[in-house]
Amino acid sequence: MQPDRRQFLGGMGLAFAMPAAAASAPPPAFAPLVPDGRLPVNRERATRLMREAGIDALVGVSPANSFYATNFRSLLAEMGLPMAVAGIIPADPVKPVFAVLPSLDIRRAAASSREWPALIAYTAIRDADRYATAADYADAQPRVMPGWPANGALTPREALWDQTEKARPLAVAGSVELGVARALSELGLAGGTVAIDEPGLAAMLPHVGMGAVKLRPGDNFFLRLRQIKSAVEIDRMRAVARLNDGAAMAMIAQLRPGMTHADIEALFFAEVVRRGGRPEFVVAGMTAGLRSERLVAHEPFMVDCCGNFDGYSGDYARTIVLGTPPTLLINRSKRLSAIARALTAELRPGMRYSDISARGQAIAKAMGADCVIGVGPHSVGLTHSDDPWRDDLPFKARLDVTMEPGMVITIDMPTLEPGWGSMHFESLIVINKDGAEWLGRDDDVLHEVTV
């Protein structure tokens, strides 16, 4: 649609249509990533938690939190610039979410089909030297960044970029903190209570006219908020599970004796990228690596694979053997599979992480497990380990989370036995109102690769 000036200056959301794609090569055998353009933020939960805590707005600038609020990752963030994008979520559900982002990203926004919050662009502060000894810079004006002159007929995408820049002034604020101050003013919260996930940004706000804002730490608040996934996020996590598990399976099929841990990483990372994702990690063998530095036929080893798709992490772990599996491995794998399925069948809202671990150990003992099996539940979402920590301690210690509908978790169930090898079983699980559901593959613990 044609955006107007009011939308660009922030008031309502913004969406752009993606130009039709040109003809391309035949599609791969698997279904690649189709990005979900909807805003992921759980506004209903955000409003409830903020009102319970007496917070008027939540500001996130970490890569995970800003993406959660804005649906966007900045090119500058990819280059390593901290606090490149800020997302501002007001407690009042009628007021818009704001995204403060670099002006150079506006063209990237125009070329996507994502749903957008209200946007405020920033460039750099004009006449910066005059503030060298100033305590405050609320009056700082943005530098106007001239566009590149055209030379020839514009392509359809270039015409969209040009339309975007003409409809929107690319210098609304001089910096991210000035943009956040602008958003808070637009929301009527220049004197409100605001939780911020980054102390550096919180320290800047009093110097840009926000001295009346009452500041609270917001990093753990974001983790609590993100634990219960919105319907959009659960849809994304279903897609993530399919893509991440598929990448792992494709990697497993290519494993051969003699490969190193670096070879395994290269295979998995390539399969993640082929499916439109970004690699995060793969653990193979023991947590410190392969027992013999290279893969050995008939020796059991685990693979724990995590790729990121559309902003969200997958998590898939299985037990691998190259060639014919020994009898002990077959028996242990069958038992681990039975333990994992029995434990998953018991998952319910109201269970705590400690309850899940205790039940897993009790089931393992009842089923006659002859090896140590770890049982470690954790949340998965915008990061691999998406759990909040306790607020009552002076150091970080993970909260013993109570299960609620809408949580996406996984349960690490490894065995690491020096002198023998390793096993593992792990898949994404969503907690429902009356139980749990596998989001990923419900396949065997043991994968035998013919070599």
Image: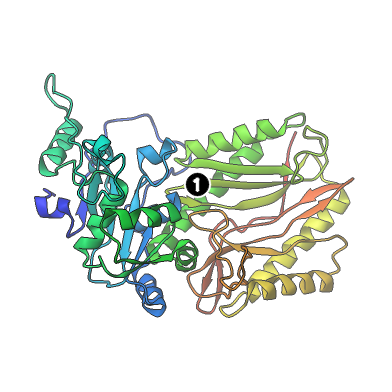
- What is the tally of numbered marks visible in this picture? 1
Which one is in front, 148 or 160? 148
Q: Is residue 346 left or right of residue 146?
A: right
Residue 17: where, in percent of width, then height? 20, 46
Which one is in front, 357 or 271? 357
User: What colouring method underlies this structural image?
Assistant: rainbow
Q: What residue type is labelled 1?
A: Asn
Residue 75: where, in percent of width, then height? 36, 38
- Which residue: 44% across, 58% down? 197
Q: Quadrant of residue 335?
A: bottom right
- Which residue: 50% across, 47% down? 308
- Which residue: 59% across, 72% down? 401
Q: Examine the rendered structure and indicate whether residue 434 appears above or below residue 172.
A: below
- Which residue: 37% across, 29% down? 25
Quadrant showing the C terminus: top right
| Pointer 1 residue | 308
Q: Is residue 384 left or right of residue 1?
A: right
Q: In this view, does 158 lie to the left or right of 114?
A: left
Query: For the residue carrying disc 1, how many other residues have a C-alpha within 10 Å: few (<14), some (14-19), or many (20+)?
Result: many
Residue 325: where, in percent of width, then height? 82, 45
Residue most extreme to the top: 151
Q: Is residue 383 visible?
A: yes
Q: Examine the rendered structure and indicate whether residue 444 appears above or below residue 126.
A: below
Q: Is mark 1 on a helix, strand or loop?
A: strand
Q: Is residue 85 left or right of residue 303?
A: left
Q: In which quarter of the image is residue 180?
A: bottom left
Residue 28: where, in percent of width, then height? 45, 36
Which one is in front, 442 or 56? 56
Residue most extreme to the front: 133
